[in-house]
């Protein structure tokens, strides 16, 4: 047994768990946060592959089949034989808006069919779709113009979800930099920057959003208005963050290692980026995660009011705005789907944020 | 004596802090110089302005502190007149500083090679493998065993003494001509203290750095310095080569300091001679000599005018009215 014992002269180095590993272990133990993480990953993947997953173009109208309920499957073919693969009937709407199957029109649901051409991940030109059918198939029903709700939800998630991610990236770049500079330099710089952020903070956020969004010219292409919405949301959001970062920077700049770095001739920007901002990591990660929902809600809110992403381009917000009237709600409840997705996404981000906070909290070491 | 021009020359340096109770002059019109390859010890009790002097030389005094006047000539260049950007290339490149908190002067987030590589890239333009080899050499020079392996270790994996040696290595990476060591051994135990000081001495011999050793430990001064400046309440009150100072101190404060240190000839079981009273507040300095209230030799004239540094022998100056009249 002694044969494998290390010699005394050999120093044995033991790798300790890095803080990241510790945090990851703790996060893994938190089942709710893990579920939220998985769910968010799924939602973002769905958005990423929206063109492949959706059977139709999000703007393709089907005026005869407006407010079509979710398609149902039939487990037998036109000959009445039982099948193991779902068949979809062609349907029509009666004047009283009842959906009836047309007899003898059953067609099997097919996987990996060729349809409209698109660019996968924005690069690869393909025409392959996950599923399709000879008959119109609407897994989640259609909206007032007969557009496939599933396709619109998938495409809409590209806008609605990325607003949060890109928005938070811009906000944090701004907030960290301005807060870091303010806290590190102090004095007049600090005063000027902080008074400016206070002005921003003093204006009620949503009204500022509305005012800024109202400046957008009405005929703007949705790609541009999407970028502008992100810009507006970030512009409103960084102020609160900058203040907290400044506070952390103020205490960190007094730490001896900052002084030592200065004495070595390290430039201020480098000190801020390498020595001061990393001190804010825990706070930043948690607050970013918890702030993302507000961006998603912000986009949804603006789009809901018609000031954000505009029809016909889908976003969860503007899709939800068509669910405003009571008749639509009671008769065609499936059009509430975007609301449900917003809700689920926001809750998931919050649960994940909570989990991260617990996992990254150095006081929670066990 | 025909001496070469000093590498570092400080003239009339004054640093003030704007406090709520008024202007506090932490460093008051001090002058000294260091030759290359020499060590000047700056001694004095807590709060006498030793550290502020060090920070002033580096131009790292934080507001509300401000360098009000004076010159810091390094090779003839006045550091106080440089722009912030120019000063940054001096810091670490020409004039380096080792601080007294080895435990916290390394950023815990980065492996110890980082500050060394950073200095190498800023001041010597070394990158990549070349920089790494030099970092290993510096750590070996600083007596870190298995330097190559341990470059990637984090500060918490090192003891205080090792951290201080790493800090010294990171400062030396920029090859400064002047090194300010602000109580580099205060937080360390005696054996480690000896190692650090030996390291500094050895490095000085190899590179010819001028060293300003700030300390309150007279033993450290006696062993490591060529010259000594004694500070009291923001002023230099006595300046002499180290042997002269210990053999024949001329300022009553220096005498008091030396008497307060136990030595082989100190009689056993008797209280040491302490300097009575305490340092006057820098906000309310007495007129006349700053040491007046604590001076055993005070004369009426001491209360009237503040004594300037005057010659008290070869290379020896003391700020006391009684230098001439006192017995040697």
Image: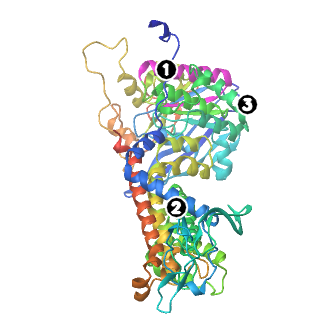
Q: Disc number at residue B222?
A: 1
From mark 3 to mark 1, how far is it between C-alphas?
Answer: 39 Å
Foreground residue among B21 and B180: B180
Instruction: Tell me where residue B179 sits by quadrant.
Output: top right
Q: Which residue is mark 3?
A: B130
Which residue is found at the position 35% from the left and 34% from the top?
B295
Measuring from the top left, give residue B255's x and y in whole percent. 40, 26
From mark 2 to mark 1, how far is it between C-alphas?
Answer: 72 Å
Foreground residue among A19 and B150: A19
Helix, strand or loop at mark 2: helix
For label 3, count other residues whose C-alpha is less than 10 Å away and answer few (under 14), some (14-19) or many (20+): few
The N terminus of chain A sits in image quarter: top left
Q: Which residue is mark 2?
A: A43
Chain identifier of the residue bearing label 1 in the image = B
Q: Is residue B225 above or below residue A28?
A: above
Measuring from the top left, give residue B37's x and y in whole percent. 65, 25
**A55 relative position to B292: left or right:** right
From mark 2 to mark 3, how far is it between C-alphas?
Answer: 47 Å
* The residue stretch that appears in magenta: B189-214
């Amino acid at each position: 047994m002694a044969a494998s014992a290390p010699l005394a002269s050999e120093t044995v180095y033991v790798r300790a768990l890095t803080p990241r590993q510790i945090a990851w272990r703790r996060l893994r133990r938190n089942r709710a946060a893990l579920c939220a993480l998985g769910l968010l990953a799924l939602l973002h993947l769905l958005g990423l592959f929206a063109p492949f997953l959706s059977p139709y173009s999000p703007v393709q109208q089907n005026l005869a089949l407006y407010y079509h309920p979710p398609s149902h499957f039939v487990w037998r073919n036109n000959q009445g034989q039982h099948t193991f693969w779902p068949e979809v009937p062609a349907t029509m709407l009666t004047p009283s808006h009842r959906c009836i199957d047309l007899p003898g029109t059953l067609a099997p649901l097919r996987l990996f069919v060729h349809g409209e051409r698109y660019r996968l991940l924005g690069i690869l030109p393909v025409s392959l779709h996950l599923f399709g059918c000879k008959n119109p198939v609407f897994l989640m029903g259609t909206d007032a113009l007969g557009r496939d709700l599933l396709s619109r939800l998938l495409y809409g998630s590209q806008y609605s979800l990325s607003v949060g991610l890109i928005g938070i990236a811009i906000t944090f770049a701004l907030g960290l930099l301005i807060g870091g500079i303010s806290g590190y330099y102090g004095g007049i710089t600090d005063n000027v920057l902080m008074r400016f952020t206070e002005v921003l903070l003093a204006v009620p956020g949503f009204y500022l959003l509305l005012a800024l969004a109202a400046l957008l010219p009405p005929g703007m292409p949705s790609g541009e208005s999407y970028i502008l919405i992100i810009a507006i949301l970030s512009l409103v959001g960084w102020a609160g963050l900058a203040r907290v970062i400044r506070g952390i920077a103020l205490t960190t700049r007094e730490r001896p290692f900052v002084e030592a770095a200065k004495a070595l001739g390290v430039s201020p920007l480098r000190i801020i980026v390498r020595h001061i901002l990393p001190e804010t990591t825990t706070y930043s990660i948690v607050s970013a995660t918890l702030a993302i929902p507000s961006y998603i809600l912000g986009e949804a809110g603006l789009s809901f009011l018609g000031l954000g992403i505009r029809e016909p381009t889908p976003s969860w917000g503007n899709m939800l705005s068509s669910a405003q009237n009571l008749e639509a709600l009671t008769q065609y409840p499936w059009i509430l789907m975007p609301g449900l997705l917003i809700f689920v996404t926001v809750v998931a981000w919050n649960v994940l944020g909570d989990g991260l906070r617990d996992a990254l909290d150095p006081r929670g070491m066990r | 004596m025909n001496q070469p021009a000093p590498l570092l020359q400080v003239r009339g340096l004054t640093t003030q802090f704007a406090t709520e109770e008024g202007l506090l002059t932490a460093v008051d019109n001090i002058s000294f110089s260091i030759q290359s390859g020499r060590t000047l010890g700056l001694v004095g009790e807590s709060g006498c302005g030793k550290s502020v002097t060090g920070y002033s030389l580096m131009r790292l005094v934080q507001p509300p502190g401000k360098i009000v006047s004076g010159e810091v000539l390094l090779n003839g260049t006045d550091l106080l007149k440089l722009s912030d950007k120019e000063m940054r290339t001096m810091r670490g490149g020409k004039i380096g500083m080792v601080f007294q908190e080895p435990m916290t002067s390394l950023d815990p987030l980065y492996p110890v090679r980082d500050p060394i590589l950073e200095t190498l890239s800023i001041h010597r333009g070394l990158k990549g493998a070349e920089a790494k080899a030099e970092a290993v050499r510096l750590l070996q020079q600083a007596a870190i065993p298995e330097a190559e392996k341990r470059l990637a270790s984090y500060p918490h994996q090192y003891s205080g003494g090792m951290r201080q040696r790493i800090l010294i290595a990171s400062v030396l990476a920029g090859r400064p001509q002047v090194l300010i060591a602000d109580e580099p051994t205060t937080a360390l135990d005696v054996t480690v203290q000896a190692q650090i000081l030996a390291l500094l001495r050895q490095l000085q011999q190899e590179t010819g750095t001028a060293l300003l050793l700030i300390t309150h430990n007279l033993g450290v001064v006696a062993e490591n310095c060529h010259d000594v400046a004694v500070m009291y309440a923001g002023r230099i009150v006595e300046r002499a080569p180290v042997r002269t100072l210990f053999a024949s101190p001329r300022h009553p404060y220096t005498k008091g300091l030396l008497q307060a240190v136990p030595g082989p000839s100190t009689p056993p079981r008797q209280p040491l001679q302490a300097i009575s009273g305490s340092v006057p507040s820098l906000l309310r300095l007495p007129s006349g000599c700053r040491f007046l209230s604590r001076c055993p030799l005070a004369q009426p004239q001491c209360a009237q005018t503040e004594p300037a540094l005057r010659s008290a022998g070869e290379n020896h100056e003391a700020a006391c009215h009684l230098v001439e009249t006192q017995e040697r």
